[in-house]
Image: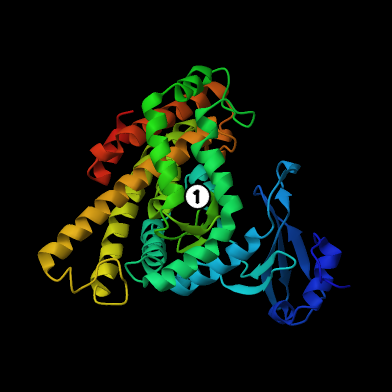
Amino acid sequence: MSFSEFRPLDENSLIEYIKATPSLSSKIGHNYDGLKIKEVGDGNLNFVYIIVGPSGSFVIKQALPYIRCIGESWPMTKERAYFEAVALKQHGGLCPEHVPEVYHFDRTMSLIGMRYLEPPHIILRKGLIAGIEYPLLAEHMSEYMAKTLFCTSLLYQSTTEHKRAVAEFCGNVELCRLTEQVVFSDPYKVSEYNRWTSPYLDRDAETVREDNLLKIEVAELKSKFCERAQALIHGDLHTGSVMVTPDSTQVIDPEFAFYGPMGFDIGAFVGNLILAFFAQDGHAGQGNDRKSYKEWILKTIEDTWNLFHQKFTALWDEHKNGSGEAYLPAIYNNPELQKLIQEKYMKELFHDTLGFGAAKMIRRIVGVAHVEDFESIKEANIRADCERRALELGKTLLKRRREFVSISEVISAMKHV
């Protein structure tokens, strides 16, 4: 069997492929007896195979030339696997504790071989639905975001390095365009792809489409998303892109990675925690009102931003005389000025985070792709009540994000919806 041109693998051709690929066959000790193969791609875009043998394991992820959940009617470049592999390697180099190791990449086959995150790792979103607390989540995610975002920005890189990297990731334009459509466009117009919990949210969806101020603010966020090459962002950092145990946090699936606004990543994560918070009432049952779990989510949101702020500014202080060219030390040469610059930068980043986070919340309620947090609430009227509260907060955050000066004010607004 030759793999010199692209073809989707099935279980049989997958084994042939592994046999032909030393970097993979060595991971299972070249032992094909008792090999277990399971296809687990529950996402929208790819085939994902778990390969477990007596002497080792790995995951194979293969990108298809269309969106899997919709089919060949919605074509999608399989080149995205290249950008995912490069992002995994670069982010993994900056934060190896929280990114799975890449063992193999094949551009022709649009295929990545990487570490299998073995049980009890589960998708964070599923843990949040189940009401499981992760005491290290904020610590780990703030660490991942601070390191990956700081070290790919001009606070750390020279403009030469940065421009080269930006140019390379401009090739991921198709996935950026998908985000532009589903996050910044579709929810604000009539689109065949939009859906919502009908009839309960019919009026709410219409209100989004008629809100002039909301549309003005969304345009500004879209322009930032398209034009601001601030850092190498993951591009899809929701709670379905994080795998967790009580003491491990691993970020997966960066196929939307490109040089964009940092706040898009931080906002995606925080916005999805906010969605999880508003979904809790729909998951409360006999004997568990989820009150204390909701408090844990609020604390996690607050800690995530505060720890991120702390770690990011610490990296900045540590490297202020390094090769980063955003603020040359010959100009920004006294502590007062450095403090003013840092405060201005972090304030804007905070407002970006709220704006992008809000946009991600809104699109999960009235756009094409919804979240299991709400979808798994069986009674439509209860689900709609939860979604409506999240939607109201999302609209408030998006339109009035500059009025918030701290994350604690956001927490307060969440409690008072």
**Quadrant of the drawing holding the C terminus:** top left
Residue 331 position within the rendered picture, expressed as x and y whole percent measured from the top left: 17, 69
Against 204, residue 373 (above or below) is below
Q: Nearer the viewer, residue 227 or 253?
A: 227
Residue 228 position within the rendered picture, expressed as x and y whole percent measured from the top left: 41, 53
The total number of labels drawn is 1
Residue 406 figure quarter? top left
Against 56, residue 147 (above or below) is above
Determine the residue positioned at 80% across, 78% down: 20
For residue 133, say whether it is visible. Answer: no
Residue 242 position within the rendered picture, expressed as x and y whole percent measured from the top left: 51, 56
**Residue under label 1:** 239
Residue 239 is left or right of residue 340, and the answer is: right
Residue 49 is left or right of residue 404, and the answer is: right
For residue 96, say whether it is visible. Answer: yes
Determine the residue positioned at 37% across, 59% down: 142
- Type of amino acid under label 1: Thr
**Quadrant of the drawing holding the N terminus:** bottom right
Determine the residue positioned at 55% across, 39% down: 182
Residue 221 figure quarter? top left
Residue 72 is left or right of residue 134, and the answer is: right
Q: Nearer the viewer, residue 119 or 251?
A: 251
